[in-house]
Amino acid sequence: MRISLEQEIKNCTLCKKYLPYKPKPIFQFSRESKILIIGQAPGLQAHHSGIPWDDKSGDRLRDWLGVTSEQFYNPSLFALVPMGFCYPGKGRSGDLPPRPECASTWLDSIKQYLQEIKLEIYIGKYSCDYHFGKYSTLTALIKEQSDLTKNKVVLVHPSPRNNIWLAKNSWFENEVLKGLKKRVQQISRLS
């Protein structure tokens, strides 16, 4: 008897020797998920709680999407899939990059499993580089790839570390986030 994809990921220890803590893959999805969010890797707070986006970045992301925590943590509505499933550890200027083993091992299988996705949201440099290739800047990528007619949106990471970028790029809230909230509300009503 084959175990489920979710159980396979929960049992994963591919990058165990590189992690500061015991592997603890953190994600959420179901076959019925309508909105796929591909982020970077869980932070330390999420590692301890076992809940994806369980920090200030998650608070801001839920605000950007215009959803409650109850909606956000409903796997029938949101698939929360990081590039690296486990907390990668601390670097000099923040958390280390996601371990590359996760994306190359699991992302294709997850995307094939998710048959009801109506909107894909890519968050942060690592997610965007993997899915769209290297761009001159994340700002250029957000402007070029955020196309709700194609049901794809690229977002800067909602970390408080990006407050300066957000202040310099007011178009992001007025153009990207306004349309994104509207699209998320439409999909939420259908669920």
Image (cartoon, helix red, strand yellow):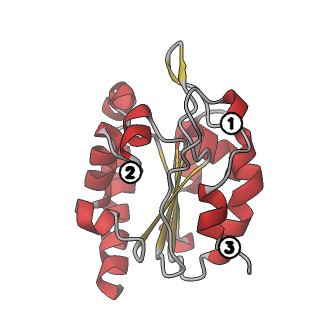
Q: Is residue 59 above or below residue 151?
A: above
Q: Residue furthest front?
A: 1
Pick the residue in front: 9 or 112: 9
Q: Residue furthest top?
A: 92
Mark 2 neighbour density, 10 Å: few (under 14) some (14–19) many (20 or more): some
Q: Which mark is residue 51?
A: 2
Q: Is residue 25 above or below residue 138?
A: below
Q: Disc count in the image?
A: 3
Residue plotted at (69% across, 28% down): 18
Q: Amino acid at mark 1?
A: Lys
Q: Please tell me which of labels 1 and 3 falls first in the chain.
A: 3
Q: Position of residue 120 (x, y in %)?
A: 53, 65
Pick the residue in front: 64 or 68: 68
Residue plotted at (59% across, 41% down): 23
Q: Position of residue 152 (x, y in %)?
A: 54, 64
Q: Amino acid at mark 3?
A: Ile
Q: Amino acid at mark 2?
A: Ile
Identify the residue position indicated by label 3 in the image: 3
Mark 1 neighbour density, 10 Å: few (under 14) some (14–19) many (20 or more): some
- Relative to 69, 75 lies left or right: right
Identify the residue position indicated by label 1 in the image: 16
Query: Quick one: SS at disc 3?
Result: loop
Q: Please tell me which of labels 2 and 1 falls first in the chain.
A: 1
Q: Are marks 3 and 2 in contact (CB under 8 Å)?
A: no
Which quadrant of the rendered structure holds the C terminus? bottom left
Q: CA distance from mark 3 to mark 2?
A: 22 Å
